[in-house]
Image: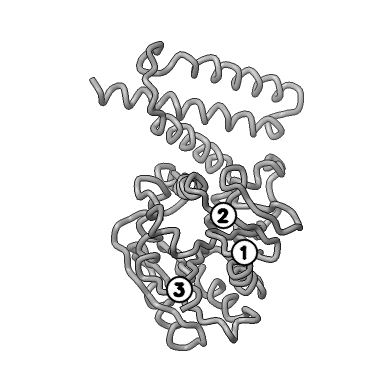
Amino acid sequence: MDISIVICSYNRAHNLPECFERLTELEGMKSIEWEILLVDNNSTDDTQSVSVRYATSSSLNIRYIFEGQQGLSFARNKGIEAATGKYVVFIDDDIRVTPIWLRTIYDTFEEFGCDAVGGRIHIESPQSLPAWISPDMYGFLGHQDFGVQAHQMDGYNEFPFGGNMAVHRRVFDSIGLFDTKLGRRGEGSQSDELFKGEETDFFHRLADSGGVFRYHPDILVLHKILPYQLEKGFFLTLHKNAGILKAQQDKHSHKRSFLGIPLFVFPQLLRAITRYIQQVFSDGKNSAFRKRMNIAYFIGMMQAYRSTAIKLK
C-alpha cells in the first residue's frame, strides 16, 4: 500500500459525506494504491453506519475502525497502527480536499525522500467572518499558508498542521506516536476539550531528530468552519488552554513565586491588560480582542501553576 489516509471523527457523522465525496474526485491516482481509515473515536451518532455505507456503495477503499479511548491522539495512534501505507496522511472530517492534493503529497515524498509533508489549509466558512477576527487570527481556525513556492520547512517555525499533514511510516518507528497526554478530547465546542499541542510536540521531536520537512502549495485543502468557532468564547478558551499547557510543560523550579505562581507572570499579565485597555479606547473592543486573548493566556498560566502548587502540598 502506498498511502493510508487517516480520518478521526467524533460525533460528526454529518461531516463525513462531503469529506468522502471530495476524496472520490481525486486526480492522478490510477498508479497509486491508497486506502482510507475512518477512526471512530467513541461516537454515539451515525458515524459507523455512514462510513460503512460509503465503504460498500462508493469506489473508495474505506476501513472503519473504532477507538474507545477518548482523545484525538488516541484515535490518530490507532489509525497509525492499523495503516498499511508507506505514507500516512491525516485530515479531519471537516476537511475538503482538492483534486491534485494526494497526488502532490505522493510526488513530494518520492522526489525528496522527506519525512513529513504539508501544504495549505484555507478557511471555508458558511457565513462572513466577524469583524473582530483579524487575518492574524485565522491560524486559530486552522488556516495555514506558507506561500506559493514549494520549499523545505524547518519543523519549528514551519511544520504541517493537523488538518493536512503527511508522515513517512519510518518516522513513527523512529520517534514514536502522538503524545496521548496532549490533544483535544471529545467535542471541540466544550471548554475543557480544546487542548492541543500534540502536533507541535510531534513535529518538534521529528525536527530534533534531524527530520526533513517539505511544503507544497498544491497540497491544498479547505477547512469547514463551524458556527461555534466564530464565537469569542472559542478563541478565549483556546488561548487560556494554551497558557495552561505552557505552565504544565514548564519543568523549571521557580524560587520566586506567589501562591505557586512564578512572579514573572504577574507583570506579563499586567502589561497584557494595559495594552488591551489602551487599544479599547483607541480602536474599540473588536480591534482589541486579540489583546484580550493574551490576557486569557496568562490567566490560564496562573491557573495551572496554582493548581500544580496545590497538588504538591
User: Would you say 5 lies left or right of 271 here?
Assistant: left
User: Looking at the image, do the residues carrying marks 1 and 3 touch, with CB atoms under 8 Å apart?
Assistant: no
As drawn, 15 above or below 214: below
Choose the circle earlier in sequence order: 1 or 2: 1
User: Looking at the image, do the residues carrying marks 1 and 2 touch, with CB atoms under 8 Å apart?
Assistant: yes
Residue 260 rendering spot, x and y as whole percentages: 36, 17
Q: Give the number of the disc on residue 85.
A: 3
Badge 2: how crowded within 10 Å, few (<14), some, or many (20+)?
some
Residue at image mark 2: 212
Choose the circle earlier in sequence order: 2 or 3: 3
The residue at 45%/30% (across/down) is 300
As drawn, 21 above or below 218: below
Residue at image mark 1: 112
The part of the image, by quadrant, that contains residue 174 is bottom left
Choose the circle earlier in sequence order: 1 or 3: 3
Mark yes or no: residue 133 visible.
yes
Q: Amino acid at mark 2?
A: Val
Q: Give the number of the disc on residue 130.
A: none
